[in-house]
């Protein structure tokens, strides 16, 4: 099951997972995007049960209605959940592998992604 956005190139690790799941059967996947909708998310929250992983996607914004903390350097934020994805652990693992591969490719082409905002800021 290659990602339809990546042409015919398949990752050996993904191929191995497919073989483990379907055996020797050939799988042809048709992607139906008629009911697809797109959201923007700059944040997420994860939860879990024994059977499922739950990921809430949403937008994290600074709450302008609340004054900032006086004793510390804190900022009040509001996380507005837009969509929730519930998946079993097998699908979640495949998603984690796929995201890891995409990030690796991105960083190979454009350089490392720095998660610490303070380190990303350019000093003048």
Image (cartoon, grey):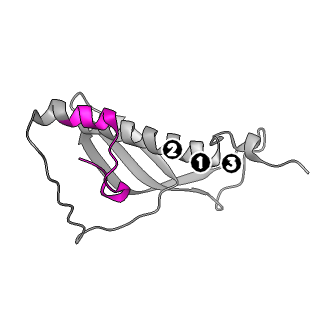
Q: Position of residue 92 (x, y in %)?
A: 30, 38
According to the image, label 1 marks what residue? 109
Q: Residue 2 carries which label?
A: none
Circle 2: element type: helix
Marks 2 and 3 close (CB-CB < 8 Å): no
According to the image, label 2 marks what residue? 105
According to the image, label 3 marks what residue? 75
State left or right for residue 90 relative to residue 106: left
Looking at the picture, tell me which residue is in the foreground, 84 or 104.
Answer: 104
**In percent of the image, x 63 and y 49: which residue is there?**
110
Q: Earlier in the sequence, mark 1 or mark 3?
A: 3
Circle 1: element type: helix
Circle 3: element type: loop
- C-alpha gap between disc 2 and disc 1: 6 Å
Residue furthest toward the top?
A: 50
Residue furthest toward the front?
A: 8
Counting the numbered discs, the total is: 3
**In percent of the image, x 30 and y 57: which residue is there?**
4
**In percent of the image, x 34 and y 39: which residue is there?**
11
- C-alpha gap between disc 1 and disc 3: 34 Å
Marks 2 and 1 close (CB-CB < 8 Å): yes
State left or right for residue 20 relative to residue 12: left
Residue furthest toward the bottom?
A: 34
């Amino acid at each position: 099951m290659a990602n339809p956005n990546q042409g015919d190139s398949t990752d050996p690790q993904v191929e191995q997972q497919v073989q483990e799941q379907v055996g020797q059967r050939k799988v042809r996947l048709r992607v139906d995007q008629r009911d697809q909708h797109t959201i923007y998310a700059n944040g997420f929250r994860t939860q879990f049960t024994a059977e499922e992983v739950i990921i809430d996607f949403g937008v994290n914004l600074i709450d302008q209605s609340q004054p900032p903390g006086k004793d510390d350097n804190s900022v009040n934020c509001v996380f507005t959940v837009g969509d929730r994805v519930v998946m079993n652990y097998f699908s979640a693992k495949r998603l984690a592998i796929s995201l890891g591969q995409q990030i690796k490719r991105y960083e190979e082409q454009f350089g490392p992604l720095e998660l610490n905002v303070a380190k990303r800021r350019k000093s003048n």
